[in-house]
Image (cartoon, helix red, strand yellow):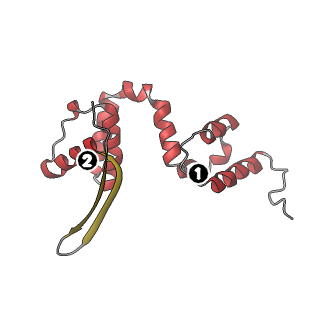
């Protein structure tokens, strides 16, 4: 069972040319250990890691700019844990919507969402977006759905 404790990492690394500050919060101890082993040893034993941990590893590897590790984790999920992805598809999508709402709301196709899809997104308890911006997006969607409405009712 993976250790789900959170590790806060805030470290300044100095070399002779560049100072880099790495700040990551909400990384599990398990994922942090895997990344450290990868950085120093270049090896990951994916057969010893469960699918949710691989998904977390993929996200953190992307955040750290470890493209090779991110690609390897993604391939591992698709090739060996497809059943887990299918069973957890809704949760996976909801997590993406909640944590990266700009992917949806900044899309040109956003206004073409069905009402039920929009309501489903808005019902997420953990939607990581300012409430005022959410209302702006709902109004934007509503105006697109009803082109006869005045988009500036204050006039």
Instruction: Tell me if mark 2 has few (under 14), some (14-19) or many (20+) residues whose alpha carbon lies within 10 angstroms of its own.
Output: some
Near-viewer residue (151 or 3): 3
Residue 27, relative to residue 4: is it above or below? Answer: below
At x 15%, y 47%, the residue is: 42
Residue 1, relative to residue 109: is it above or below? Answer: above
Q: Quadrant of the C terminus?
A: bottom right
Q: Which residue is mark 1?
A: 107
Q: Position of residue 92 (x, y in %)?
A: 46, 36
Q: Quadrant of residue 153?
A: bottom right
Near-viewer residue (130 or 136): 130
Near-viewer residue (144 or 91): 91
Q: Position of residue 53 (x, y in %)?
A: 31, 37
- Point out the residue furthest to the bottom here: 17
Q: Looking at the image, is mark 1 or mark 2 earlier in the sequence?
A: 2
What mark, if any, has residue 32 been given in the picture? 2
Q: Quadrant of residue 65?
A: bottom left
Residue 131 is left or right of residue 51, and the answer is: right
Instruction: Tell me if mark 1 has few (under 14), some (14-19) or many (20+) residues whose alpha carbon lies within 10 angstroms of its own.
Output: few
At x 80%, y 46%, the residue is: 146
Count of labels shown? 2
Q: Position of residue 83 (x, y in %)?
A: 38, 24
Residue 73 is left or right of residue 88, and the answer is: left
At x 35%, y 34%, the residue is: 52
Q: Position of residue 60 (x, y in %)?
A: 33, 49
Tell me, yes or no, whether the two marked residues, 1 and 2, touch with CB atoms within 8 Å: no
Real-space Cα distance between discs 1 and 2?
A: 33 Å
At x 65%, y 41%, the residue is: 113
Q: Quadrant of the N terminus?
A: top left
What mark, if any, has residue 125 been given in the picture? none
Q: In what element is the residue under mark 1?
A: loop
Q: In what element is the residue under mark 2?
A: helix
């Amino acid at each position: 069972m993976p250790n789900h404790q959170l590790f806060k990492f805030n470290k300044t690394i100095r070399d002779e040319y560049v100072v880099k500050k790495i700040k990551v919060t909400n990384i599990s101890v398990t994922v942090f250990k895997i990344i450290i082993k990868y950085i120093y040893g270049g090896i990951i034993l994916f057969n010893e890691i469960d699918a949710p941990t691989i998904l977390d590893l993929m996200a953190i590897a992307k955040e750290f700019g470890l493209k090779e590790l991110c690609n390897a984790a993604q391939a591992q999920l698709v090739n060996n844990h497809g059943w887990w992805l299918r069973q957890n598809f809704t949760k996976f999508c909801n997590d993406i919507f909640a944590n990266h709402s700009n992917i949806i709301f900044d899309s040109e196709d956003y206004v073409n969402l069905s009402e039920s899809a929009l309501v489903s997104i808005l019902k997420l308890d953990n939607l990581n977006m300012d409430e005022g911006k959410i209302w702006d997006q709902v109004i934007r969607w509503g105006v697109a759905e009803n082109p006869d409405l005045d988009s500036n009712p204050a006039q």
